[in-house]
Amino acid sequence: MVDSVMIIKRLICLEFKITHECLVGRVNLRKFVRPRHIAQWLCKQCTKRSTPEIGRLFDGRDHSTILHAIRRVEFLRKNPNFDSLVTRLRAQAQAEIAAERARFRAANESCQRYGQITFGPRKES
């Protein structure tokens, strides 16, 4: 299964040059909070996960914390520079998630073709 949240976290860590621990941790410095909020917003935008699920993936945060992050990013999008940043990151995250899903499907089909272990129901020919 494709872990979309990990793809988003990796993308944010690379973009803002921070570690995974700083992204999900409890440090409340602006240089970590802003990327964390963007990552949480992207998780809501690019996945079907609920806010409680997203909170658990960010060091056990409460769902209301995730809602605050989503609202904060939406408010900050009024700034054209910030909006272009999050729009670019969302497009990049969606592209990486789609590419990973395609690799997963190809690997699964290859395994099915050769009678190896599969990752889901087997297609009947």
Image (cartoon, rainbow, N blue to C red):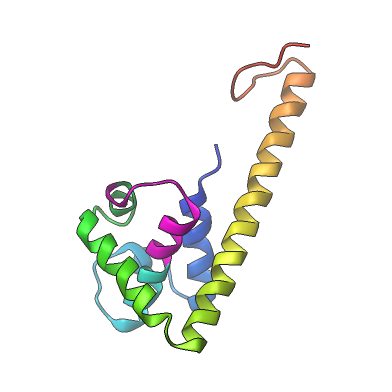
Q: Is residue 49 left or right of residue 71?
A: right
Residue 72, by quadrant, is: bottom left
**In which quadrant will I find the C terminus?**
top right
Left or right: where 3 falls relative to 100: left
Q: Quick check: is 13 in the magenta stretch?
A: no
**Vertical comparison of 49 with 105: above or below:** below
Q: Which residue is at a point 41% across and 70% down the rendered structure image?
A: 38
Nearer to me, 25 or 46: 46
Q: Residue furthest top?
A: 124
Give the total number of marks visible in the rendering: 0
* 82 left or right, relative to 52: right
The residue under the point 30% across, 52% down is 51
Question: Residue 111 in the image: x percent, y percent?
Answer: 73, 24
Q: Residue at x 21, y 59 (%)?
A: 64
- Picture coordinates of residue 104, whole percent (x, y): 66, 38
Q: Main secondary structure of the magenta part?
A: helix
Work out whether residue 69 can be spotted. Answer: yes
Picture residue at 55% right of the left edge, 73% below the top: 87
Magenta segment includes 50: yes
Quadrant (top left/top right/bottom left/bottom right) for the N terminus:
top right
Seen as rendered, the residue at the extreme front is: 78
Vertical position of residue 124 compared to residue 56: above or below: above
Where is residue 103? Give x, y as percent: 70, 42
Residues in magenta, as a range: 39-52
Question: What x and y, as percent, mark residue 86?
Answer: 50, 74
Q: Is residue 20 visible?
A: no
